[in-house]
Amino acid sequence: METDSPADVRIFSKPGLVLIDNQIGFTHPTHWGVHRSNPSYEENLGHLLSAFRDRGHPIFHVAHHSTDPNSPLNPISNPLGAHFLSFAEPHEGEPVFIKTVNSSFIGTTLEKAIREADIKELFVAGLTTDHCVSTTTRMGANLGVVGETGEIYVVGDAVANFERGKWDAETVHQVNLASLDGEFAAIISTEGVIRSLQNWCVPYISTSFIEFSSYHDITDDITDATNISTYP
């Protein structure tokens, strides 16, 4: 469910991108469900991330570190699963926020980072549509992280989820996007975001990230604390 049309080129002032839980653990063949929605999720999220990097817009990565030892996202029992998927791995200097619950704002400094960067258009992508993407979007709207004149966007073809009970994955995906649309966020496509960014002339480069550790700094800290291996 992406509601923008080819003619819909939007004007962005200070865009920022939040990428949620793009981690290897979500490739587990059975833990989350056998079937996943949106086969284009990986490709679209990769294009979205490249577009923000090319234009120097702020990017915020979020990773889930489950406290359940049986979870593929537990960094101690399943260290590889807690790592980022290769197409979404943070670059040096891009801040990473580690969470243990569904909301990316609880137990992290993400809200502070977004406010200090003065983000006016916050784009949300990642996994999963009905859990952490939805919870983060709803809480971000309730917190007013982009201010009264800002807007939160969920990039509908750069998120995905799995089947839930008797409901197939695509139905769950579309219903959750419809539930968010107009109440907590606007739904937009990857193409719509990139097309609008191409009409954004002067890159907005924030200097507010200097207080945040880079991805490598944070994973070094995790290694010290849990004695697990991390990406170099």
Image (spheres, helix red, strand yellow):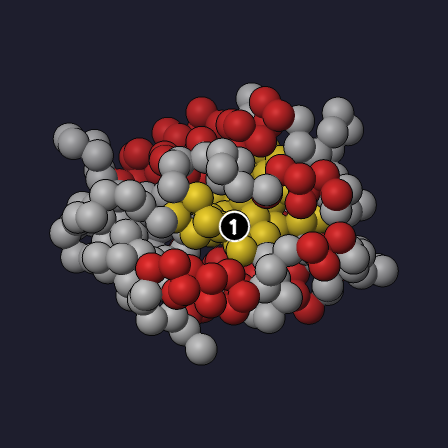
Q: Position of residue 226 (x, y in %)?
A: 33, 59
Q: Residue at x 73, y 63 (%)?
A: 56
Write down the quadrant of residue 224 in the picture: bottom left
**Residue 56 in sight in this render:** yes
Q: Which residue type carries mark 1?
A: Phe
> To which residue does mark 1 refer?
97
Image-based side of 202 in relation to 92, left or right: right
Q: Is residue 123 left or right of residue 100?
A: right
Which residue shows up at 44% across the image and 44% down it?
99
Locate residue 231, reporting x and y percent.
41, 73
Q: Quadrant of residue 135?
A: top left
Q: Where's the C terminus, which quadrant? A: bottom left
Q: Residues within 10 Å of mark 1 (few under 14, many from 20)?
A: many
Q: Residue at x 59, y 52 (%)?
A: 60
- Looking at the image, residue 4 sits to the left or right of residue 42; the answer is right
On the image, the x and y values in percent for residue 57 come to: 71, 58
Q: Height in image: 24 above or below 97?
A: below
Vertically, is 187 above or below 219?
above
Q: Residue at x 73, y 64 (%)?
A: 55
Label 1 element class: strand
Q: Quadrant of residue 199?
A: bottom right
User: Considering only vertical position in the picture, is 108 above or below 57?
Assistant: above
